Amino acid sequence: MSTDRPDAPDIPLTAPGGIDRAAHHRFDEAWLAAAWSHPTTRVFVVSGGQALIDDTPDGRTELVMTPAFEAPVTETHRYFLGTDEDGVRYFALQKDALPGRMDQSARPAGLREAGMLLSARDAALMAHAVALENWQRLHRFCSRCGERTVIAAAGHVRRCPACGAEHYPRTDPAVIMLVTDDRDRALLGRQVHWPAGRFSTLAGFVEPGESIEQAVVREVAEEAGVAVGEVRYVASQPWPFPSSLMLGFLARATSPRITVDGEELHEARWFSREELGAAFESGEVLPPTGISIAARLIELWYGKPLPAGFPR
């Protein structure tokens, strides 16, 4: 792996949001109770990976937050997310449905949409809350003894009352990589369930017992049959859909020969910058856009922003 790291592009969900997660307070019930009752505390509801967002008169988009005393009632699914530099505490509430709004101006949005619209602070808060909600919904029982677990540490731990096991939020590492060859062409693939024209970078999960660099080499070989040599890390991106951390790389192929697996990839092609630009113009290729790091990796090579495409 090369230590010559390219300049990391601006990646959604990774910009500093000014939030201190203040993890040392998560087990302090007295502090949490005081924080919840403080008049400056702000709360938002998350449900099914969505939260309410609203457009402000000055053109910004914000999470819909309320003081704690106006928030829906819940004692167990209340997650402490952190504090900002002004001392404001933030909580998320997990509910079965989002609350209605009297003014009808707010709308529900998932992180794929909201992550491109919200401020760095609000995007960071929502990503944290969505990740916790996904984990809480999918891990209600102890993997050791099967007993139903209870929430602890302000939403960041589930504890088993039967065997005493503690379970922590899961994050699955996944590699995502733009591969280039000795002619500086980029390898893009189309997954089997994507419609014609949709192309993006290759990606896959890190397996037990392998490094992230080994995962890049293996995934490219398995999906496209392309051998990879040099691997350079670029940046990471939280991806709570439901619980991944995307690790972005640039990789160099040692051979241009492509043999797609037919299971994950239906098609893979080498593109020069000119060929890709022409394919964008004709509509033959739809690029990845939205909050995914995939678009940012392609842009590092392409040299300019991609046209509007589809959210990977």
Image (cartoon, rainbow, N blue to C red):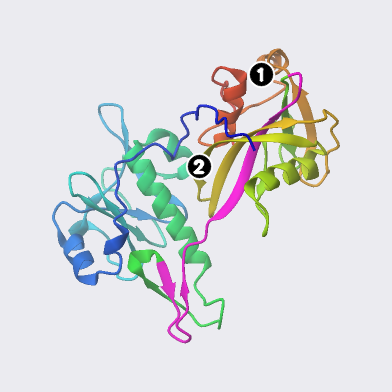
Question: In terms of image quadrants, where is residue 197?
Answer: top right
**In the rendered structure, which disc, 2 or 1, sits on the residue that comes first in sequence?**
2
Is 261 displayed left or right of 85 in the figure? right
Q: Secondary structure at mark 1?
A: helix
Question: In terms of image quadrants, where is residue 277?
Answer: top right
Residue 107 seen in this snapshot = no
Query: Any magenta on residue 24?
Result: no
The crowd level at tag 1 (other Cα within 10 Å; few <14, some 14-19, many 20+) is: some
Query: Any magenta on residue 178?
Result: yes
Residue 71 image offset from top left, x and y in percent: 25, 58
47 over 214 or under it: above or below = below
Amino acid type, mark 1: Phe
Residue 152 image offset from top left, x and y in percent: 36, 71
Is 229 displayed left or right of 310 in the figure? right
Residue lying farthest to the front in this orientation: 3
Residue 159 image offset from top left, x and y in percent: 43, 76
Q: Which residue is mark 1?
A: 280
Distance Cα–Cα, label 2 vs label 1: 26 Å
Q: Nearer the viewer, residue 291 or 157?
A: 157
Q: Which residues are magenta?
A: 157-183
Pointer 2 and pointer 1: residues touching (CB < 8 Å)?
no
Q: Nearer the viewer, residue 41 or 44?
A: 41
Is 223 displayed left or right of 37 in the figure? right
Is 263 displayed left or right of 109 in the figure? right
Q: Which residue is mark 2?
A: 237
Amino acid type, mark 2: Gln
